[in-house]
Image (spheres, grey):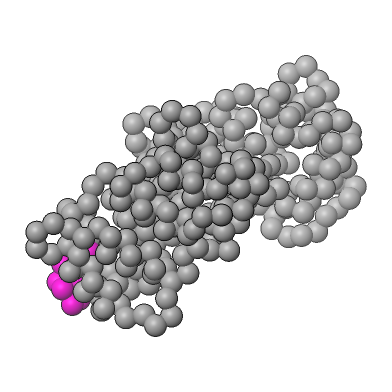
Amino acid sequence: MATVKGISSFSAEQEAQALRKAMKGFGTDEDAIIETLTKLNVSQRQQVLITYKTTIGRDLIDDLKSELGGNFERVIIGMMTPTTMYDVHELRRAVKGAGTDEGCLIEILASRTNEEIRRINENYKLQYDCTLEEDIASDTSSMFRRVLVSLSTGNRDEGAYVDGALAQQDAQCLYEAGEKKWGTDEAQFMSILCTRNRSHLLRVFDEYRRIANKDIVDSIKSEMSGDLEDALLAVVKCTRNKPAYFAERLYKSMKGLGTDDNTLIRVMVSRSEIDMLDIRREFLTMYGKSLYSFIKGDTSGDYRKVLLRLCGGED
């Protein structure tokens, strides 16, 4: 369930004028910007973007960028970006920014549906004149690269059919590829975890626990390390419970010293219209504190205000 749903009686012109008013003249009315943009959904914001240019003759994104700054600006610009393009920009930043942001690559590629991944690929190519796969391949290496390339095809089986015998065989393969042998056959893990459908994998994980006497997550943790471990764990977690996966991403972005703003912003912006209520519920269950209270304690100013609006409330 979403926290940002949009409004039913919607006038793009009215909202465009409200935004112009918030930025015109001396000083900026940040509260009005937050108020206007968080009550609209992403497609309504796109209409406002066009109407703003038509009725005011200025570019809304340029105006926002010149008036706002820092993490607050990044959240607002993220909210103004169409869903697929937001993922495209994040993936590009992950490979072309200073150093590689492996966490971002893993999070987007492991959690998006086939349809979403196909749209990302199309738009990425149009925007940057090279494929996402080429950028991933030039920026990562070895088995981690292979996992990301596999996920980036958006070609996982999305059916619901479970072949009991195959599930048993898959579980046995995973056991023999990891726990049972010295060294790990990583390719075997990849080919099963990145291609099978969700229902089938859930059965495989049950079978695996029966055969190996431990959870697949624990096996991956003991058999793998680094980015490859993170990627395969993300695949397993997204298969089991996607909102719980995002709750953990948010928790890790804020706990301890400093804040991983990239992750915090991306998850809050990209999930607010999809499953933020579910993420909040999982967060509370997993950590005994509300997501709202965590954000409140970890951020400040307008940045905090807009994130709390995306969060949608205290649990």
When the figure is inspected, residue 31 is found, relative to residue 18, above or below; the finding is above
Q: Answer whether residue 233 is visible to the viewer in this image.
A: yes
Write down the quadrant of residue 182 in the picture. top right
Residue, x 57% and y 44% (percent of image)? Answer: 289
Residue, x 28% and y 74% (percent of image)? Answer: 15
Report the magenta residues as a range.
52-60
Return the x and y of residue 276 as percentages of the image width and height.
54, 57
The residue positioned farthest toward the left in the image shown: 25
When the figure is inspected, residue 126 is found, relative to residue 177, above or below; the finding is below
Please tell me which residue lies in front, 307 or 182: 307
Please tell me which residue lies in front, 62 or 195: 62
| Residue 55 colored in magenta in the image | yes
| Residue 64 colored in magenta in the image | no
When the figure is inspected, residue 154 is found, relative to residue 237, above or below; the finding is below
> Please, what is the dominant secondary structure of the magenta stretch?
helix
Residue, x 43% and y 72% (percent of image)? Answer: 6
Seen in the image, is 19 located left or right of residue 83? Answer: left
Seen in the image, is 99 located left or right of residue 200? Answer: left
Write down the quadrant of residue 191 in the picture. top right
Seen in the image, is 267 located left or right of residue 289? Answer: left
Write down the quadrant of residue 212 in the picture. top right
- Tell me the quadrant of the picture where the C terminus can be found: bottom right
Q: Answer whether residue 89 is visible to the viewer in this image.
A: no
